[in-house]
Image: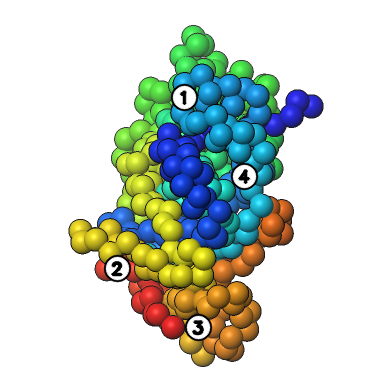
Amino acid sequence: MAAPASSALLTDHYEFTMLDAALQHGTAHRQCTFEVFNRRLPADRSYAVNAGTDRLLTLIERFRFDEVELAHLAEHRVVSPASIEWLAGYRFDGDIDGYPEGELFLPEVPLLMVRADFATGVLLETLVLSVLNHDVAVASAASRMWVQARGRPLIEMGSRRTHEEAAVAAARAAYLAGFASTSNVAAGHRYGVPTAGTAAHAFTLLHDSEQEAFAAQVAALGTGTTLLVDTYDTLEGVRRAVAVAGPELGAIRLDSGDLAALARGAREILDAAGAHATRIVATSDLDEYALAALANAPVDRYGVGTAVVTGSGAPAAGLVYKLVEVDGRTVAKRSSGGKSSRGGRKAAYRRLGPDGVASAEVVRVLGPGEEPVHHRADDERLLTVPLMRAGHRVHDGTLAEARARHAHAVAELPEAARALRAAGPALPVVRG
């Protein structure tokens, strides 16, 4: 197998500008803590979901400047020859702490902390933010949809609406946040996400009649397949589908029109034909609001595409990467305009009531050399965990564990925090 590609040039130019200047000035060696957080949530959201951490740690392990990368930087004079020499030996050798994948987080809490000398840590800013901002946005949107689906399985179907590599990451993030499967085969191969798929209208139009198309699909895939019934007349399509496949038909898919009314009509036709176990799958530009509107319709599962992988349904997470400590000294941005930062290395805890329902997020500033206390109090759960130590990964959680963690964290929230139109953050953030 070929060696994995370097991730070192997935970096903004200004990171190299700061590196070059710090190396020349003699400040590059200062020990720093960089913190990742967001300042606010998108409208109607009460929480965000951490996702992408595992992908990020893998990319940090591949953050190497080999001959190709160094030649590019030298040819375009991105940095000085002395910096080229320094980059040739770059290996991330610092510590990283943060929330594990699947955990929920709120504004102004330390989602991720990178501890290293300035030169080593500053180069990771762009990579950290590009991975986490994407995956957190998708997972946060997926979580809202998962809540509104009320136990009905969700299929992620957004591959054709985004960049080819973003599609794979999005499928993983959606599965982490509760989706049951994805249409993206690469996500199945790389991450073990279950894959599912039916057929497009093109398959029906290829044949001389809808009935012929259904017969061809059933002959190839068996009666357990899912038939797309809305190419022509939807309810007539349902009748043709059950006539071809019989009462053992696996499912039908509705992809246009008044989905609630069509689902009711389809259910009547299927039940009259004895196809009581045939499932109804609804697609067609669904988002969390459409899912909520379909709550009382006889739909068995949903397919969601555009809204879970693009900004229309997954607005930017707004994560930033800020320096909060230098050589043990607290530093912070103090400018006006709502873009200040809070200095100091921190740890986060979730405070729980006697009923197990979360009541607050607690953020504590750590002293020099201090590590988070795992059992600070019986009613507080530590959220900040070690991810890397001295450049080596120490957290190897699985996708299945992250998925279970997400479900547990959502169940801990107050009922109001799971509302479709939240009034604000799910929990108050308390400075301990």
Amino acid type shown at disc 1:
Arg
Residue of label 1? 77
Q: Residue at x 43, y 34 (%)?
A: 13
Q: Quadrant of residue 363?
A: bottom left
> Image quadrant for the N terminus?
top right
Give the labeled residue for mark 4: 60
Q: CA distance from mark 3 to mark 2?
A: 19 Å
Characterize the local packing of mark 1: few (<14), some (14-19) or many (20 or more) Cα atoms within 10 angstroms. Answer: few
**Amino acid marked by disc 2:** Gly
Which numbered disc covers residue 424? Answer: 2
Identify which residue, 349 or 185, lies in the foreground: 349
Vertical placement of residue 421 versus 11, above or below: below
Percent x, y of residue 79:
48, 31
Q: CA distance from mark 1 to mark 4?
A: 24 Å
The three-letter code of the residue at mark 3 reads Leu
Q: Which residue is mark 3?
A: 352
Instruction: From the viewer's perspective, tell me whether residue 231 is left or right of residue 192.
Output: left
Q: Disc 1 or disc 3, which is closer to the eye? A: 1
